[in-house]
Image: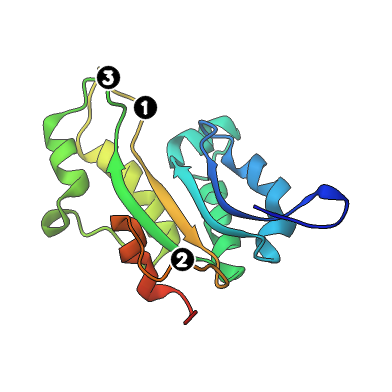
């Protein structure tokens, strides 16, 4: 983090938001920092069902999509991580396989609403009386002004580096 006048933080290298469905509330407090690219890398849990539930939404995906649209319209590049379900649950094996096999799931990454609805579709496609939490992913949002060391040491850093502006 960079420090500015009056010992306040001017920018953050990384912010992780995982608030079990309350992510849109957190993002509403980060609007100015995001618009001004004060956060280089932002990782957020993207759990459409949880976000809709915690925000009393009847319009599926309205809040989750608005959250990602705010990041994208501010110039952040979005990267979806692995899709997951609750680790201690009785998730149908077919659903686990379907979630992360790109040969069969055809996740629509090009359309935020369709991407969000994909998580509801998995639940519809593989119903379970024992599991009703839904499915999610983490989203990595990269600021257009983000920088990494010349030689990133992590696998994610190596994947993101080509998408950054030349340093």
Say if residue 25 shows up in the picture: yes
Residue 121 as seen in the image, left or right of residue 16: left
Q: Which is nearer the eye, 153 or 93?
A: 153
- Give the camera-side residue of 96 and 151: 151
Residue at 18 percent across and 37 percent down: it is: 95
Callout 3: few (<14), some (14-19), or many (20+) C-alpha neighbours within 10 Å? few
Instruction: Say which residue label 3 marks.
Output: 88
Asked which secondary structure carries label 1, the reply is loop
Viewer-side label of 2, 3: 2
Q: Does any portion of residue 61 appear in the rendered image?
A: no
Compared to 144, does 22 lie above or below?
above
| Nearest the eye: 106 or 147 | 147
Q: Return the mark for residue 113.
A: none
Q: Is there CB contact under 8 Å for labels 1 and 3?
A: no
Q: Which residue is mark 2?
A: 148
Badge 2 marks a residue whose secondary structure is: loop
Q: Please determine whether, in this image, residue 50 is positioned above or below residue 76.
A: above
Q: In the image, residue 115 lies at what x, y percent?
A: 37, 56
Colour convention of the picture: rainbow
Distance, label 2 to label 3, CA atoms, is 35 Å
Q: Earlier in the sequence, mark 1 or mark 3?
A: 3
Looking at the image, residue 153 lies above or below residue 167: above
Which residue is under mark 1?
Answer: 133
- Disc 2 and disc 3 in contact, CB within 8 angstroms: no
Cα distance, mark 1 to mark 2? 36 Å
Depth check, mark 1 against mark 3: the one in front is 3
Among numbered discs 2 and 3, the one appearing first in the sequence: 3
Q: CA distance from mark 1 to mark 3?
A: 11 Å
Q: Tell me what residue is drawn at x 12 percent, y 31 percent.
A: 93
Q: Badge 2: how crowded within 10 Å, few (<14), some, or many (20+)?
A: some
Residue 98: percent from left, percent from top: 16, 45
């Amino acid at each position: 983090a960079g420090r500015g006048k009056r010992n306040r933080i001017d920018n953050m290298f990384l912010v992780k938001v995982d608030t079990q469905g309350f992510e849109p509330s957190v993002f509403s407090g980060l609007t100015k920092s995001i618009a001004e690219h004060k956060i280089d890398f932002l990782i957020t849990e993207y759990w459409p069902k949880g976000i809709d539930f915690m925000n009393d939404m009847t319009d599926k995906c309205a809040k989750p999509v608005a959250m990602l649209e705010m990041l994208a319209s501010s110039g952040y590049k979005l990267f979806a991580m692995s899709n997951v379900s609750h680790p201690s649950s009785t998730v149908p094996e077919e659903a686990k396989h379907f979630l992360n096999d790109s040969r069969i799931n055809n996740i629509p990454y090009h359309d935020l609403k369709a991407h969000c609805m994909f998580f509801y579709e998995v639940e519809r496609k593989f119903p379970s009386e024992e599991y009703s939490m839904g499915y999610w992913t983490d989203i990595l949002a990269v600021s257009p002004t983000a920088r990494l060391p010349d030689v990133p040491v992590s696998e994610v850093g190596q994947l993101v580096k080509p998408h950054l502006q030349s340093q």
